[in-house]
């Protein structure tokens, strides 16, 4: 979970690019409360690389807080943006 000024700043698209380059699978989506949820799977170093990026985000973002939770892997293939077409 990423909180701050993280919607409407190309956070999701940039996250997809970073995750794909790192070799992580999963998804990213905007939530109604203004936060962004990132779900990641893959090698630990790939996931950590995306989490490290999320702590800063793209240039136009202001990240105030990142919460990381471990969950059971779901077998994601590739990386997608949920709700594509809404605020980036």
Image (cartoon, grey):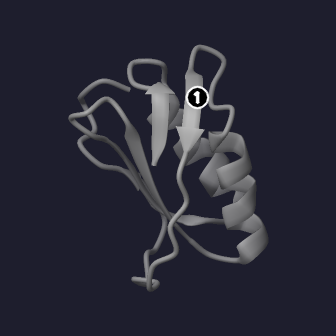
Query: Crowdedness of circle 1 by 10 Å Cα count: few (<14), some, many (20+)?
Result: some
Q: Where is residue 28 in the image (x, y as percent from the top left)?
A: 41, 49
Q: Where is residue 65 in the image (x, y as percent from the top left)?
A: 56, 38
Q: Secondary structure beneath disc 1?
A: strand
Q: Nearer the viewer, residue 65 or 50?
A: 65
Q: Please, which residue is most extreme toward the right here?
A: 45
Left or right: residue 10 versus residue 33 is right
Q: Nearer the viewer, residue 16 or 73?
A: 73
Vertically, is 28 above or below 8?
A: below
Vertically, is 36 above or below 87?
A: below
Q: Quadrant of residue 55?
A: top right
Left or right: residue 26 versus residue 65 is left
Which residue is painted at 55% across and 60% down in the image? 68
Q: Position of residue 3 (x, y in %)?
A: 46, 34
Q: Please, which residue is most extreme toward the top here?
A: 60
Q: Position of residue 51 (x, y in %)?
A: 66, 53
Which residue is painted at 24% across and 30% down in the image? 85
Left or right: residue 49 versus residue 20 is right
Vertically, is 56 above or below 5?
A: below
Q: Quadrant of residue 83?
A: top left
Q: Circle 1 sits on which residue?
A: 63
């Amino acid at each position: 979970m990423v909180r701050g000024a993280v919607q409407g700043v190309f956070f999701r698209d940039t996250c997809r690019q970073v995750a794909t380059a790192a070799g992580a699978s999963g998804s990213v989506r905007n939530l109604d409360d203004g936060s962004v949820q990132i779900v990641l799977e893959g090698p630990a170093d790939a996931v950590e690389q995306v989490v490290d990026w999320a702590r800063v985000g793209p240039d136009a973002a202001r990240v105030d807080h990142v919460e990381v939770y471990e969950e059971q892997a779901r077998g994601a293939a590739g990386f997608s943006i949920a709700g594509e077409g809404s605020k980036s």
